[in-house]
Amino acid sequence: MGDVQRLVQDAIDGLVASGAERGLQVAVYREGELVVDAVAGVADAESGRVLTSDTPIYSSSTGKGLTSAVVHTLAEEGVLDYDVPIAEVWPEFGVAGKERATLRQVLDFTVGLPAVPADTTPEDLFDWERMTAALAAAEPWWEPGTKVGYHPQTFGYLVGEVVRRVTGKRISQVLAERVAGPLGVADEVFLAVPREELSRVARLEASGPPVDLDQLEAMMPTFFKIAPRAVQLSAELCNRPDYLAAEIPAGGTVTARGLARVYAALLGPVDGVRLISPERLKEVSGVASQGVDEIFGYPTQYGLGYSLMRPVASPPPGPVIGWPGADGSSADADLGSGTVLAVTKVSFTPGDFTTVGVVSDVVVGALG
């Protein structure tokens, strides 16, 4: 793997030694080849269990990349169509102004269903039928297709239910069968962790000062309307076995290596496996929606199922598709250079992508 492997390993060893991070995984693919597979620190601070490259880590919205990969793989196979009204495959959805809403509008975050019910509990999140029924009955916040806004939790249920309706299977199963299995990473990327695999998962650790929810809500009132306090992500919630095992495909439990391999197979062949055609990749990575985000209030830009913006300033050579996570993790693919970077973390650092920036600078500096 050469100099870039050594440079990244040195960087993450330093981050762990300094106390900035507890445990880190970094994987880099370049034109279909794994060029970095680096790991440092522990998977569980209490037990001292060592973090390895095949230790899955819950990585919140970074896992959305898996959900979108499933959709595009099925579209490539002709199983679903982005532009068919959702109500054609999910009849209960076709009410309250959503009769013509499409999967494309879910993927580009213009469908107008960003909120879970205000009284949602963690246990409700685990109840697929309850959550999808609530979304089917919901009235959009705006006419589908007319505005753009992030859907942090509902994205997974909306996409997952469409997948279930067209395949008869849960999206976690489709991921294993159609995406992760062919790529040899079915034991490294999960949208719902099998009970027998839970003991392998890293234990997240809250990092930094406690989050002042009152202050945060005052700064981001709309966000708290779409994601009530009871279901705001935290290390405590994301360590719960019932949370990890539940089908909540707005996030995922992954290794950096496994997730990077999935992204690499979107860009091109990986050991003979390519998930989508160059033509579909061009469609997926093009600007599908942009404007001021109705939830966060800042300019945003989405492709189909992916953000087109990075969480750090390090500029890659070309356009990117990817996702950051609320825990401080990130994964993205640079279409210009064919480089995929995935960073997964044991320390739960809400909104802090300092480590991703450090690693990205090293990778871009070494590979261009």
Image: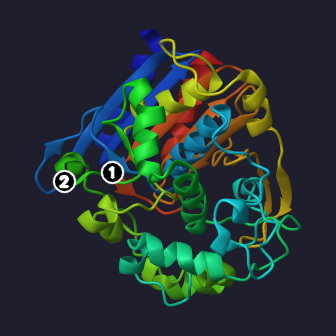
- Image coords of residue 80 (percent x, y): 67, 45
- Image coords of residue 361 (percent x, y): 58, 32
Kindly state the secondary structure of the residue where label 2 is placed.
Answer: loop
Horizontal relation, residue 249 to residue 108: left or right: left
The structure residue drawn at horizontal position 78% and vertical position 65%, both measured from the top left corner, is 101
57 relative to 251, above or below: above
Q: Which residue lies most toward the left here? A: 47
Residue type, numbered disc 1:
Val
Is residue 285 shown to the viewer in this render? yes
Give the residue number, with chain letter if any, for mark 1: 346
Q: Which residue lies most toward the top here? A: 2
Horizontal relation, residue 217 to residue 185: left or right: right
- The number of callouts visible is 2
The structure residue drawn at horizontal position 35% and vertical position 41%, both measured from the top left corner, is 24
The structure residue drawn at horizontal position 48% and vertical position 48%, both measured from the top left corner, is 329
276 relative to 114, above or below: above
Q: Tell me, yes or no, whether the two marked residues, 2 and 1, touch with CB atoms within 8 Å.
A: yes
Give the residue number, with chain letter if any, for mark 2: 45
The structure residue drawn at horizontal position 58% and vertical position 27%, both measured from the top left corner, is 275
- Image coords of residue 21 (percent x, y): 35, 48
The disc, 2 or 1, on the residue closer to the chain's N-terminal end is: 2
Residue 295's quadrant in the figure?
bottom right
Residue type, numbered disc 2:
Ala
Kindly state the secondary structure of the residue where label 1 is placed.
Answer: loop
Residue 298's quadrant in the figure?
bottom right
- Image coords of residue 326 (percent x, y): 51, 60
Point out which mark residue 198 bears.
none
Q: Nearer the viewer, residue 209 or 68?
A: 68
Measured in 3D between alpha carbons, the distance from the residue under mark 2 to the one under mark 1, in whole angstroms, is 9 Å
9 relative to 329, above or below: above
Q: Nearer the viewer, residue 8 or 132?
A: 132
